[in-house]
Each structure stands twice: as structure tokens, then as C-alpha cells.
Image (cartoon, coloured by chain):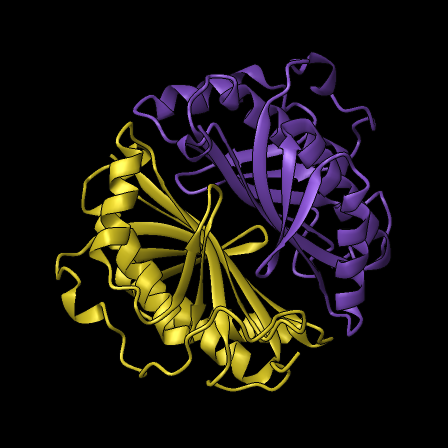
Chain colours: A yellow, B purple
């Protein structure tokens, strides 16, 4: 019960799942997890999700890198998850906070553009002005080099995978500076046959 | 801007995606959408998600039926999504509210048990007592014939698919009776090779 304050030095986490729509899904998942350096976070995988906990910069760095590694197989792949910071029911266990603020995987990402579509929603909790915080972030996303469009309950981002994750990270980072408990849910999809 | 009140007669919706981890993902998705009666809701699918809007009973009835139809293929399938009710930014368009309160697909669901694992989180918005609402629902789920266990940021449910969706629907229904704007995010997975 120690995460009530706001700011950058808090324990954040994500529960996410990578979904390769392929008979080779096991290999694609294991290869992506293997190729990405996740030493900067605590990580645990079960049959439903992978949970990572650590600094915000690292949980976005690693989810972005895992998705990019899977997408470069050319298969139709998606990822869904929920980021969280400041949960009052959370604890100090299972987290690495002594890491530096340098994203570990960013220098090794392919320079090739990988297009994707993504829908996300930010949920600032425990605040009656939460809608203002949401609208502020929708505006922020407009400036991030991705196409932004409204969708029921969510905001759609289209563009390069790295730009999409960067826009989500910036929005999440900005809201959690002002709101103690913030969550963000997303689904990102690449190589969909609907787009061929 | 008309959905500020609480209660059962509100427009609810869900943005969800079905993920068959199979080369036959297109056929599995189209077959599940085809076999399930979704005439009770407004529905729109793009390359990232499917959005459905209507009464709470129908959006849960249909997501449950779609997941069950896909899972009975025996393939590893998952579904992620976010339910929402009472969003102040929402509108009256794209919704069917004149339908009856009878779930259309429930009578046609296979009586065969289909085991699954699921993680979900309820986010009551705009309330400083939101954590109490969350904890009340975690208690509720304990009584619903599914195994309940804690997970970082989420609650895990294990059991039959129908029981899992019923527990989520009851939790969502109960919270939205008291909280104007409520969202619920979930990921459910069946036939994972991790469990063989």
C-alpha cells in the first residue's frame, strides 16, 4: 500500500498476451520472448497472460520489442494487455526498480517500418475529473506521428508499431503524473489479411 | 451525453477480438460469427476489434457464444476485450435497446463443458470509493462456481467458459448498478498447450 503518490519512480506493470494467428504460435511466442532482453523487469508467464513489473520505460520497451519481433515473421499477430500503475492493492514484491532509465531493446529494433492498427483506452481511477484527463491524452496522441481516430469506448491509432507504443507510453506517463491509479488497456494488430 | 444514470436500461458495449492461434484463423472467426445470433445488438468489425452495442445481457450472451463456438474447434483460442457502460462521451447511435431481456444464444450453447482460464479487471470510474467496489466484486466471484485467484492488477477465474462469462456479467452488472461509468477488461484462453 505504498504507491499512492504520483510521479515517475513508481512500480508499474502490465498483463499482456501475444496472439500469433498461426499453427506456429508456440515458436513465434517463444522466439519473441527469447530474442527480447527482459532483464530490466520482473516477469512471469502463465497460460493466459504474461505479467511484467518494473519501470514504465521498461515495460513499454519490452512489450514493443516482443510485438515487433513477432510481427516481423509476417504472420498475422496481435497483442492485448492492460498497463497499470499505482494500484492501492498492489505490493512491493516481484519488481525491479533499481534499473537505469535507458530502454534496453530500443537500439536493437529493426529500422524497417511495421504498420499496425491499435485501439486503446486510458482509465484514470478515483477521480471525478477523469474524463478531462482522458480527453487531454486523446489530444496528445494527435501530435505523435500516428493517425488518431475515435472509436466507441477507445481511441484508434494507426501507423508504425514503434510510434504507436511511443504514443501510448507518453499518454500513460502523462496521466500517471497527475492521477495516482491509472490503467490503460490496448489491442494492437499487424499483418491482418483484412488489410491486404 | 445521456447515460449518466445507473441501472439496467443503459446502453452498454464491448470492443473485443477473437484470437484463434491457428492457420485456419479466418475460417474459425467467420464460422463463429456466422453461427452466433447477433441480431440483438449493433455490431461492427474492423481489422483490430469487433464492437457490439446493446443491452448488457446480449453483449455477454454473444461474446460467450462466439468464444464457445471457436473453442469447440479444439484449437488454442483466446479472446480479449473491454466492456463499457455509461461513458459520458458516448452517444445514442449504433445501438439496439428495444430487444427483449432474453439471451438469444444461451439455449443453443453446447452442454459440453469447455474449460478455460480468464483474467479480468473492473474499473469503476469517477469514484473515490472505487477500490471498495472492486473488492466487493472479487468477493462476489467467489460464489459463482469458478475458481478465483488473485493476480497482479487482475482477478483470475478458472472453470467452465459459461460460468466464467456469467461471473463476469454478474460482477459488471452489480458494479454498474452503483457506478455510472464502469469498464471491465478481460482475456480468456482455452485449449492452451501449456495445460496439456
Query: Which image quarter: residue A75?
Result: top left
The relative height of residue A196 versus residue B139 in the rendered view (above or below) is above
Q: Position of residue A65 (x, y in %)?
A: 26, 59
- Furthest-left residue in this view: A111
Q: Residue at x 38, y 83 (%)?
A: A98
| Pick the front one: B161 or A34 | A34
Check the image and report above or below for B132 versus A78. below
Q: Quadrant of residue B47?
A: top left
Q: Say whether residue B185 is left or right of residue A164.
A: right
| Placement of the C terminus of chain A among the 4 image quadrants | top left
Relative to residue A16, is residue B177 drawn left or right?
A: right
Tell me which residue sits at (78%, 45%) in the image. Answer: B142
The quarter in which the N terminus of chain A is drawn is bottom right
In the visual, does A130 lie left or right of B76? right
How many numbered marks have been drawn onto this rendered protein structure? 0
Residue B55 visible, this orientation:
no
Q: Is residue B99 above or below residue A147?
A: above
- Asked if one can make out residue B27 in the rendered structure from this viewpoint, the answer is yes
Position of residue A10 measured from the top left corner of the image (x, y, whole percent): 50, 81
State the residue at coordinates (42%, 21%): B28
Report x, y in % for residue B98: 80, 31
State left or right for residue A24 relative to residue B79. left
> Is A71 drawn above or below residue A147 in the view shown?
above
Image coordinates for residue A159, horizontal then vertical, percent: 29, 57
Amino acid at each position: 500500500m505504498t504507491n499512492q503518490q504520483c510521479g515517475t519512480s513508481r512500480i508499474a506493470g502490465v498483463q499482456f498476451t501475444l496472439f500469433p494467428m498461426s499453427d506456429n504460435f508456440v515458436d513465434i511466442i517463444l522466439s519473441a520472448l527469447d530474442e527480447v532482453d527482459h532483464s530490466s523487469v520482473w516477469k512471469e508467464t502463465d497460460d493466459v497472460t504474461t505479467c511484467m513489473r518494473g519501470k514504465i520505460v521498461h515495460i513499454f520497451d519490452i512489450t514493443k520489442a516482443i510485438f515487433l519481433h513477432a510481427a516481423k515473421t509476417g504472420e498475422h499477430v496481435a497483442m492485448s494487455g492492460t498497463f497499470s500503475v499505482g494500484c492501492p492493492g498492489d505490493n512491493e514484491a516481484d519488481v525491479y526498480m533499481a534499473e537505469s532509465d535507458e530502454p534496453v531493446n530500443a537500439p536493437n529494433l529493426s529500422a524497417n517500418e511495421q504498420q499496425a492498427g491499435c485501439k486503446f483506452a486510458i482509465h484514470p481511477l478515483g477521480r471525478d475529473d477523469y474524463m478531462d484527463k482522458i480527453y487531454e491524452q486523446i489530444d496528445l496522441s494527435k501530435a505523435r506521428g500516428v493517425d488518431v481516430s475515435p472509436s466507441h469506448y477507445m481511441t484508434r491509432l494507426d501507423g508504425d508499431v514503434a510510434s504507436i507504443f511511443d504514443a501510448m507510453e507518453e499518454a500513460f506517463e502523462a496521466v500517471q503524473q497527475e492521477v495516482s491509479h491509472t490503467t490503460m488497456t490496448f489491442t494492437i494488430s499487424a499483418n491482418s489479411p483484412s488489410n491486404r
